Image: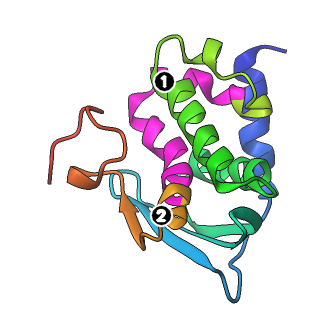
Amino acid sequence: MSSKQMYQEVILDHCKKPRNWGTLSEPTHKAEGINPLCGDHILVSMNVVNEKIENIQYEGESCAICMASGSMMTAKVKGKVCAEALDMTEQFRVLTTEPDGADRGEGLGSLAVFSGIRDLPSRVKCALLPWHTLIAAINSQTEISTEGDKDPVPGSGTTKG
């Protein structure tokens, strides 16, 4: 199976059956993520106990790439300490934005299917939005956007607005 076929299968699977979909009733941390260009709008909620992500959920309206990324992200970081989740976020950013990112994405497992997205600049922010919303929640920020001075990927080609 080609990497493109695997990418499409994984995206489709996580769109049809998103993992950890919903919102926690009394989260210790939560944040809203917005990608105005695509229209993605998500909420990440989680319970963090002793720096460990005990439970995490996300929901909202988003494109298939954002939904699949959020589904896979929640599955990957649940049970991890916040520092590990932040490290995974940086690995995922490198995987999706840097030319040699696929070589440096070890440890991300099935998330490696997103390595080819760097060739689709307009879709990179869709894949990154759940991860940046996770960072915002960990840092007790209530909202993050992919545009203007709030863009979590500096130099990504957008203008401040």
Q: Please indicate whether residue 19 sits to the left or right of residue 86 in the image.
A: right
Three-letter amino acid code at the position of disc 2: Asn
Return the x and y of residue 85 as percentages of the image width and height: 65, 48
> What residue sits right under mark 2 in the picture?
139
Return the x and y of residue 117 as percentages of the image width and height: 54, 27
Residue 126 in sight: yes
Where 8 sits versus 160, above or below?
above
Q: Residue at x 33, y 58 (%)?
A: 36
Main secondary structure of the magenta stretch: helix
Return the x and y of residue 7 as percentages of the image width and height: 72, 29
Where 24 sits versus 81, above or below?
below
Q: Which label was assigned to residue 118?
A: 1
Frontmost residue, 68 versus 110: 110
Q: Please indicate whether residue 108 sits to the left or right of residue 38 in the image.
A: right
Image quarter (top left, top right, bottom left or bottom right) of the N terminus? top right
Frontmost residue, 109 versus 138: 138
Magenta-colored span: 112-133
Question: How many marks do you count on the picture?
Answer: 2
Contact check, label 2 and label 1, Cβ < 8 Å: no
Mark 2 vs 1, N-terminal side: 1
